[in-house]
Image (cartoon, rainbow, N blue to C red):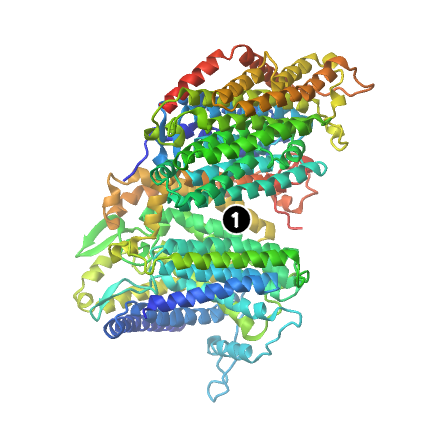
């Protein structure tokens, strides 16, 4: 009972910290916007403020804490105690493990003070460039994710994302595709065969899944007729609407919200799988393997290795943010948004409303980070050919199918003259899409659960020979383009 | 706000049908992997290919009677020329697919991809013939080129196909770049990529201001096309590629690619010529025609390798078509600014329906049809005679292989003889009628000298064509010569081609009459 | 001195320097990375020209996809430092002359350019709408539909052709 109380207290502490930070974010963004416009006549001060608070504070702090969280969660799931050896040598604290928190500090100190080793035959410039190229794109991805609604602060409209370009999601694809350079260069510049193998594996996996990644979001773009995340017609804002609106009890609105994962369940699964593969975390972690090729960062030490490591956690946070913004209603609650907006305190002080919605956003992000950690420690890793098979033969066709079905349903469901109506007014017309989405998911689940006769031989294909299945094509005229792993 | 109606898409229906057929074949191949005895159950693929080609040809035939017009925002035209070429292409690809069926089965190399690529190539040809804008034209040219590159390197036994595919790819990419560079210069001079727009600008501002830009562009574009139609001196790749490619593919290349490329070439230059006067294309194509007719035939003379001989003969025949093209721009052919019609993608520009021009167009189109049927037949016999055992020996296509064919395979010998006579321009075959029409058109246009060269070279050509006939009918087969396999698909294809060669030679009336009517309609 | 002016020169100089890097570095991987940088800075210039979509596609397609494949090929062929470059060879001389000629032609062409370009956009709004995703979509699907779809056919044929040629012996 006491333990539940402690956990509840800590959760409350975290939520109120997020609330405070979001309130500060709105304040700083409004202040910078006002100052820059009045002093220099330049718009976009809010973006700078957001860069400081959202990216440097929120993303970095959550990513740092995730390093500890990952250890704690893996320990919990494997029935171990977890990190508890690092202590603070002060009276009263010596015997306290402090939930492993000192480990973060020791990690940092270790990485900063370790020898910065460089292989003799490595290409110095590219060797040093690679960690930066791995870290920067992952970090920059967050730039278009809105952490809160656009609200007037200090007399200026302040958006809660670093930028809101008109090409929206294309920015994510563009920057995500740059992340390949970090891994492949690290593998090549180390002048180490294991590193090269790891780099090649990493980059081939990433470019394979980029295709599925792009296709999985087309359905959402079609549904909301936009590629933007932030802004008044962005996906996050539109997800505040309701597909089915039930009742209003005293002005409190209840209904089934137009969240992306309800409209596009298949798209969500595809995007989650593909982006998980992009982060190169288990079960897609063949680029690193302690028992075989070690990884593309085998020659890196000290803070350069640290950059690779923290890039992975930043990716986890950013991925969670993107998924929340696209599929889980962004900064909106599933109910009561309009009631909240109508409260006098929020009408008078819009930044408070922003802070509330911002807190909702970050809580969702943290929950999704937890889901990713749980997946990472639950599933066994894929074999290399299974990864390619999943990407090219399952995710890609299913993604194409999803695009066609979604397009057809939307074409059928939208009323005449839909192009002239505001995007928010079209949301109720998307009801068939949600139904079709559920049917799609049911079909896919049914297909997956049906035991297949050829399943055994399909798995044996990776080994090439030695299977006795008479139905399989003979090797002499086997036209199967199976990616063989050896 | 521009929008498209179903009428806009009519001209691309045949190409769409071909592409859909190709995709169906590709998909079927993907699902075939899980079928037991997959290699034995591929017989349906050629059937699908032929049905698709027949369907596309029917639709194109229907299109040929439509009123000529510009469609798809001025990016394509629906006119008898493109429809006619599409019909020719459909016939060609249908016959080539039939030939491939036996050819590939014999080599245990039948795959859906092969037929799919053939259909894709045909779709590219059809689209190329109706493109009325430079970027579209280039993209469609690449569709057909890329498909033929892959087809050339499809069978990889020994070094020849790989070498041929690589050569074709490199030179094709090079010529494509030249064409694109020329198009860029023309765009710079006129500010538009649409042929109709170019024609309008060039006609309006015929000052010498940008003349050199236009001349350079024209020369580069002509060079790019000359590579594709294998005109001397841009023919170097032809013998090697034709010899290295699987024989049915060679047939498709020499018949279909040539027909489509020639129509595109004519369309481009008819649009470009008027503003600055037709002298540049006249000199260009006159020179190319002369060189191609003479050199192509001379180089074919000493060949004992029949496939190589046919490759050079294909070069020579490009020369005869070029003679017809030259006639279009001949100074004596009529007053300026005539006969533009829908060919230049703008029916408004046409003024006087010069009957001389109609005759020339008719001659060129009929020649292309005749050559397509004939070359399919001749390469078809060649494909039927090939055996997989002597692929590495280099004597596969030697003249001696034809010795005594009249005794062992009289049907094939007759087909080959008809095709050889047709290629040589000897009555009563379609080749004779084609040459007659082209030479008459040339003489009417005042190109007496070139026409005489043409007649002389085709007389010389009769030597090497007839030599094959002599070998077939008057020599005895070598001892122990292996008898090639027969496949019913090959026999059907050869029968159709031979019937075409002879029937069109005896009764060209319906086709020429229709062509006259259609050309007059388009030039109106 | 507006912000655009400063940014333009930053991007322009960076583009030129990284483009130089492509040809002067001896290491093929470094060359490829310089090319990536060139594309990236070029995308910056596109943004300054209000061509946002072209900019992001430049990064996505050229820097993100095509150059990755280049890098792959170089890495897997394990090309080392290039040693075959001799000081003077006929090709080098021809190349030098051609480059000098091209430079002269470009200089001449630039001298002929008008002093200041006339503004073609009627308003800032028009400028902002230019080059956006929706404008590009309008042009692609309402005017250039035919070549656009033809390109998709071309890509399909190229993929099928590549797979056919890459297959083991048939």
Residue B523 against residue C9 in the figure, above or below: above
Whether residue C27 is visible: yes
Q: Is residue C19 left or right of residue A190?
A: left
Q: Which x, y percent locates residue A252?
A: 20, 57
Which residue in the rendered view is the most extreme toward the right?
Answer: B479
- Can you give x and y, in whole percent of width and height, for residue A76 in the image? 50, 66
- Position of B268 with respect to B158 (left or right) is left
Residue at 40 percent of width and 59 percent of height = C111
Quarter of the figure with residue B168: top right
Residue A184 appears left or right of B203: right
Q: Is residue A215 above or below residue C11?
A: above
Which subunit holds the residue at mark 1? A
Q: How many marks?
A: 1
- Give the residue displayed 60% in from the left and 53% down from the top: A383
- Residue density around tag 1, few if under 14, some if 14–19, many if 20 or more, within 10 Å: many
Query: Residue A265: x percent and y percent?
Result: 39, 48
Instruction: Give the residue displayed 41% in from the left and 58% down from the top.
Output: C110
Q: Nearer the viewer, residue A16 or A191?
A: A191
Q: Residue furthest bottom?
A: A91
Query: Which quarter of the figure is the N terminus of chain A placed in?
Result: bottom left
Dividing the picture into quadrants, the one containing residue A402 is top left
Considering only vertical position in the picture, is B378 above or below A134?
above
Q: Nearer the viewer, residue A384 or C80?
A: C80
Residue indicated by mark 1: A391
Please name whichever residue, C72 or C16, is drawn nearer the observer in this view of the structure. C16
């Amino acid at each position: 009972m006491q333990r539940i109380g402690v956990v509840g207290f800590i959760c409350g502490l975290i939520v109120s910290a997020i609330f405070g930070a979001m309130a500060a974010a709105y304040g700083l963004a409004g202040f910078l916007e006002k100052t820059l416009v009045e002093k220099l006549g330049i718009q976009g001060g809010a973006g700078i403020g957001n860069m400081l608070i959202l990216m440097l504070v929120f993303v970095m702090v959550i990513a740092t804490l995730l390093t500890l969280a990952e250890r704690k969660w893996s320990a919990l799931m494997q029935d171990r105690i977890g990190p508890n050896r690092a202590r603070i040598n002060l009276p009263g604290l010596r015997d306290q493990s402090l939930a492993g928190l000192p480990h973060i500090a020791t990690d940092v100190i270790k990485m900063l003070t370790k020898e910065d080793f460089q292989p003799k035959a490595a290409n110095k410039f590219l060797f040093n460039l690679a960690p930066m190229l791995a870290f920067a794109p992952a970090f920059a991805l967050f730039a278009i994710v809105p952490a809160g609604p656009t609200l007037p602060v200090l007399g200026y409209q302040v958006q809660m994302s670093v930028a809101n370009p008109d090409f929206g999601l294309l920015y994510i694809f563009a920057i995500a595709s740059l992340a390949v350079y970090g891994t492949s260069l690290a593998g090549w510049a180390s002048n180490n065969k294991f590193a090269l193998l790891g780099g090649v594996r990493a980059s081939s996996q990433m470019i394979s899944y980029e295709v599925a990644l792009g296709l999985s979001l087309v359905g959402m773009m079609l549904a909301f007729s936009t590629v933007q995340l932030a802004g008044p017609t962005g996906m996050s804002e539109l997800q505040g609407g309701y597909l089915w609106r039930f009742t209003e009890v005293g002005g409190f609105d209840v209904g089934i919200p137009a969240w992306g994962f309800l409209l596009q369940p298949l798209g969500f699964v595809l995007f989650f799988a593909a982006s998980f593969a992009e982060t190169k975390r288990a079960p897609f972690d063949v680029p690193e393997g302690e028992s075989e090729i070690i990884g593309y960062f085998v020659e890196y030490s000290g803070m350069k290795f640290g950059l690779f490591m923290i890039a992975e956690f930043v990716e986890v946070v950013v991925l969670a943010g993107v998924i929340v913004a696209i599929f889980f209603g962004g900064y909106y609650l599933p109910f009561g948004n309009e009631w909240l907006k109508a409260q006098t305190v929020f009408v008078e002080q819009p930044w408070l409303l922003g802070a509330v919605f911002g807190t909702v956003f970050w809580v969702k992000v943290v929950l999704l980070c937890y889901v990713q950690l749980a997946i990472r420690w639950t599933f066994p890793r894929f074999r290399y050919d299974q990864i390619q098979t999943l990407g090219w033969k399952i995710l890609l066709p299913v993604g194409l199918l999803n695009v066609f079905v979604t397009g057809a349903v939307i074409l059928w469901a939208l009323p005449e003259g839909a192009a002239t109506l505001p995007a928010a007014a079209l949301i109720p017309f998307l009801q068939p899409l949600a139904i079709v989405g559920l049917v799609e998911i049911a079909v896919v689940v049914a297909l997956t659960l049906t035991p297949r006769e050829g399943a055994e031989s399909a798995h044996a294909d990776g080994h090439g020979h030695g299977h006795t299945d008479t139905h399989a094509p003979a090797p002499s005229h086997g036209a199967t383009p199976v990616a063989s792993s050896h | 706000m521009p929008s498209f109606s179903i009428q806009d898409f009519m001209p691309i229906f045949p190409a769409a049908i071909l592409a859909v057929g190709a995709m169906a074949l590709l998909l079927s191949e993907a699902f075939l992997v899980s079928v037991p005895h997959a290699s034995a159950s591929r017989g349906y693929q050629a059937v699908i290919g032929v049905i698709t080609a027949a369907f596309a040809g029917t639709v194109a035939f229907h299109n040929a009677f439509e009123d000529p017009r510009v469609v798809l925002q001025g990016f394509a035209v629906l006119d008898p020329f493109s429809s006619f070429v599409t019909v020719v292409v459909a016939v060609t690809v249908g016959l080539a697919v039939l030939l491939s069926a036996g050819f590939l089965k014999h080599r245990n190399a039948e795959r859906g991809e092969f037929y799919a690529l053939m259909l894709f190539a045909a779709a590219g040809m059809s689209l190329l013939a109706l493109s009325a804008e430079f970027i579209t034209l280039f993209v469609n040219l690449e569709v057909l080129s890329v498909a033929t590159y892959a087809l050339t390197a499809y069978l990889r036994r020994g070094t020849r196909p790989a070498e041929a595919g690589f050569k074709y790819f490199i030179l094709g990419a090079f010529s494509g770049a030249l064409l694109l560079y020329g198009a860029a210069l023309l765009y710079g001079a006129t500010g538009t990529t649409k042929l109709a727009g170019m024609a309008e600008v060039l006609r309006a501002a015929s000052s010498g201001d940008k003349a050199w830009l236009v001349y350079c562009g024209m020369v580069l574009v002509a060079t790019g096309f000359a590579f594709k139609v294998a005109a001397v001196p841009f023919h170097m790749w032809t013998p090697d590629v034709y010899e290295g490619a699987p024989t049915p593919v060679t047939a498709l290349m020499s018949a279909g690619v040539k027909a489509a490329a020639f129509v595109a070439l004519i369309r481009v230059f008819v649009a470009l010529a008027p503003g600055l006067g037709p002298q540049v294309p006249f000199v260009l194509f006159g020179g190319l025609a002369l060189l191609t007719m003479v050199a192509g035939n001379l180089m074919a003379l000493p060949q004992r390798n029949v496939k190589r001989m046919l490759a050079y003969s294909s070069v020579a025949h490009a020369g005869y078509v070029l003679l017809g093209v030259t006639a279009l721009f001949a100074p004596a052919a009529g007053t300026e600014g005539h006969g533009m019609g829908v060919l230049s993608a703008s029916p408004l520009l046409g003024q006087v329906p010069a009957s001389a021009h109609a005759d020339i167009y008719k001659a060129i189109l009929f020649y292309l049809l005749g050559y397509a049927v004939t070359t399919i037949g001749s390469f078809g016999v060649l494909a039927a005679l090939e055996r997989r055992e002597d692929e590495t020996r280099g004597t596969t296509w030697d003249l001696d292989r034809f010795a005594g064919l009249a005794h062992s395979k009289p049907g094939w010998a007759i087909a080959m003889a008809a095709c050889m006579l047709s290629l040589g321009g000897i009555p009563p075959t379609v080749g004779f009628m084609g040459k007659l029409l082209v030479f008459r058109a040339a003489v009417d246009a005042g190109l007496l000298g070139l026409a005489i060269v043409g007649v002389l070279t085709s007389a010389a050509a009769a030597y090497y064509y007839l030599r094959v006939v002599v070998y077939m009918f008057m020599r005895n087969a070598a001892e122990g010569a292996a008898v090639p396999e027969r496949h019913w698909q090959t026999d059907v294809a050869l029968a159709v081609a031979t019937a075409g060669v002879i029937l069109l030679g005896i009764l060209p009336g319906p086709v020429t009459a229709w062509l006259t009517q259609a050309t007059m309609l388009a030039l109106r | 001195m507006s912000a655009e002016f400063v940014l333009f020169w930053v991007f322009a100089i960076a583009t030129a320097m990284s483009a130089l890097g492509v040809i002067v570095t001896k290491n093929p991987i470094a060359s490829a990375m310089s090319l990536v940088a060139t594309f990236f800075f070029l995308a910056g210039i596109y943004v300054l020209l209000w061509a946002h979509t072209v900019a992001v596609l430049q990064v996505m397609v050229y820097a993100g996809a095509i150059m990755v494949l280049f890098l792959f090929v170089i890495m897997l062929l394990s090309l080392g430092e290039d040693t075959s470059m001799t000081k003077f060879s006929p090709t080098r001389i021809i190349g030098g002359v051609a480059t000098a000629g091209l430079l002269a032609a470009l200089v001449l062409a630039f001298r002929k350019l008008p002093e200041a370009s006339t503004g073609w956009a009627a308003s800032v709004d028009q400028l902002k709408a230019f080059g956006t995703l929706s404008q590009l979509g309008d042009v692609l699907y309402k005017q250039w539909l035919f070549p656009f779809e033809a390109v998709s056919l071309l890509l399909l044929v190229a993929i099928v052709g590549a797979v056919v040629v890459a297959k083991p012996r048939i």
